Amino acid sequence: MKVPFVSFKPMECELDGELRKAFDRVFSRSWYIEGIEDEAFETSFAEFCNSKYCVGVGNGLDALMLSLKALGIGEGDEVIVPSNTYIATALAVTYVGANPVFVEPDIRTFNIDVTRIEPAITDKTKAIMPVHLYGQACDMDPIMDLAKTYNLFVVEDCAQAHGATYKGHSIGTFGDGAGFSFYPGKNLGALGDAGAVITNNKDIADKVRALGNYGSDYKYHHIYKGNNSRLDELQAAFLTAKLPYLNKMNKERRRIAKLYMDGIDNPEIILPYVPEYTVPVWHIFGIRCKRRDELEKWLNEAGICTNKHYPIPMHMQECYKDLGFTKGDYPVAEEISATQLSLPMYYGMTDEEIGYVIKMINSFV
């Protein structure tokens, strides 16, 4: 049996009519940037997230970068980020001229270890950027307490967690702002690159919007040295068509995750740990195995596609060699990078496919 790591086909077949209507709507108007589709999606997504404001941008990296710029973070400042995440989190900090300060994750949840944040705070620290990795919420209460104590901003990286909650509240609504990615593989994905910033602060929302539109608050009037990062009408229309189905699709991901959790029984495998404070949306179902590469080969030869998130930790990436880190500086992130394996997880997986993955993992010796 062949089991893809991800497939868009089940979702696309189910939403075919809605997506085609969205395209026709935009095409018939001949209006492609900053129009009614963008406004409609921003309103709907803000409501979905229980946030006051949403600003569409070009992609998830821009969402984080523009949030930091809107908060006035720049040259010489420090922003605390987890040492285990996708590199876009750190790049957003770099792009505003600030310095990323890596803090190790909790080996159980893969998210930032809140007990390690305070020792990393200096007089240059301006913000904490927690990442709700793999669709599971960070422990936000201690983070917000630290932010209040040290007068720091909090920008949540929600790129993988559309619809996840922390103690019953939507992620993205705790900090000063939050960045989302709508890359096609996300739980809520566009048919191309797209992103958004949500916030409960109107001044931040207005500044993000201006910064993403060449620093302009109205045409040919530029109040900031901005960027070109706007959610185009076509992607906004596609996202609006898909948003009403997101809860249903997240529910199905939770069902698949439960089948994995209940069915995988192999002492070689460390299953995900889910704290009581979060209801995850399982963008990624990541296990750990000391013999990860052997397990990966075993599954791939059985026709099961897998992925590794992320095989090279950020502090060991060539682009950050100027920070002077070496192997061993962040051992928890390195341990996760060496042992983590992502299993197939997508809306539309059949029970037969799920059962086959479980069977092959349990038979790995």
Image (spheres, rainbow, N blue to C red):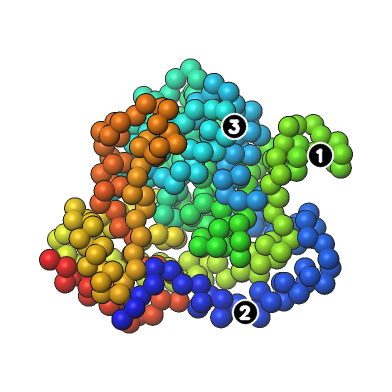
Residue 267 shows in the view: yes
Nearest the viewer among 237 and 47 is: 237
Q: Which residue is mark 1?
A: 217
Can you give x and y, in whole percent of width and height, for residue 278 in the image? 41, 53
Residue 118 lies in quadrant: top left
Label 3 to label 2: alpha-carbon separation: 40 Å
Cα separation between marks 3 and 1: 20 Å
Amino acid residing under circle 1? Asp
Instruction: Depth check: give the residue in front, 267 or 52.
Output: 267
* Circle 1 crowding by C-alpha within 10 Å: few under 14, some 14–19, many from 20: some
Q: Dot 3, crowdedness within 10 Å: few (<14), some or many (≥20)?
A: some
Q: From the image, tell me which residue sits under label 3.
A: 96
Sooner in the amino-acid sequence: mark 3 or mark 1: 3
Above or below — where is 296 with respect to 137?
Answer: below
- In primary-sequence order, the first of circles 1 and 2 is 2
Which residue, given by chain and number where applicable, does mark 2 sit on? 16
Query: Is 250 displayed left or right of 115 in the figure?
Result: right
- Figure quadrant of the C terminus: bottom left
Tell me the amino acid under the disc marked 2.
Answer: Asp
